[in-house]
Amino acid sequence: MKLIFSPASPFVRKVRVMIYECGLTQSVELVPVKTTALATDPLALNANPLGKIPALVVNESTTLFDSRVICRYLDDRANAGLYPQATLWEVLTLEALADGILEAAVAMVYEARLRPEEQQSQAWVDAQWGKITKSLDALDAQRFPMLEGAVNFAQLSIACALGYLDFRHDGRKWRDGRAWLTDWNDAMQDRPSLSTTLPSD
Ligand SMILES: N[C@@H](CCC(=O)N[C@@H](CS)C(=O)NCC(=O)O)C(=O)O
């Protein structure tokens, strides 16, 4: 299998975490690309008409894209049990929350990097950060049962989302006022699938 990837992409990181958890690191070749909405890498476009990464080339006739699809596929293929049947919908909902945090956080980066300064909207950036803060408050206050106990992909995807906030939005100090979530995140960090996939440029 081949993973079309960038080391900075948090959606790619989710897939790399899953690859590690499934014991598939030797079975997946990493193919690096540099792609943005304004300059799509041909390899990314060839794998996914949306031009987005991650995309997983499984074989000559099958390429999967979207991190949620790829992660479910790998978990199923390796029988890893990171989407437990008994709590499947709760786990998927928390993964959707992680992805929503990431979509907003990535959009903020694109606004600053890809849009000409005179076209950038502070109100829009603030609205994206508002989505993130409300999500973090919910995670901190609600103590979702899926975030505790045996590891599952809700935990790993939320850890990837928090890792991306550290990587790209460190100055916004997401930990302030969120002691429970901070401790939870700290406890996750030694897991090898996370510590070996830290984002980088
Ligand atoms: N929902 C997708 C989001 C993927 C995504 O937005 N990837 C970004 C990199 S972090 C990308 O490829 N951006 C290029 C573009 O928007 O054209 C997933 O979960 O895989």
Image (tube, grey):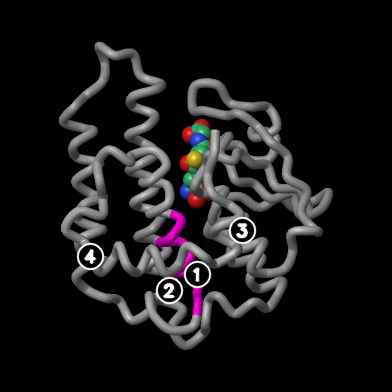
Relative height, residue 154 to residue 111 (above, below):
below
Percent of width and height locating residue 5: 64, 41
Q: Which mark is residue 91?
A: 2
Mark 2 lies on a secondary structure that is helix
Mark 3 lies on a secondary structure that is helix
Mark 4 lies on a secondary structure that is helix
Mark 1 lies on a secondary structure that is helix
Q: Which mark is residue 179?
A: 4
**Label 2: how many residues lie within 10 Å, few (<14), some (14-19) or many (20+)?**
many
Q: Are marks 2 and 4 in contact (CB under 8 Å)?
A: no
Q: Is mark 3 within 8 Å of ligand 1?
A: yes
Q: Which mark is residue 153?
A: 1
Which is closer to the viewer, label 1 or label 3? 1
To which residue does mark 3 refer? 70
N-term mark: 1 or 3: 3
N-term mark: 2 or 4: 2
* 57 relative position to 139: left or right: right
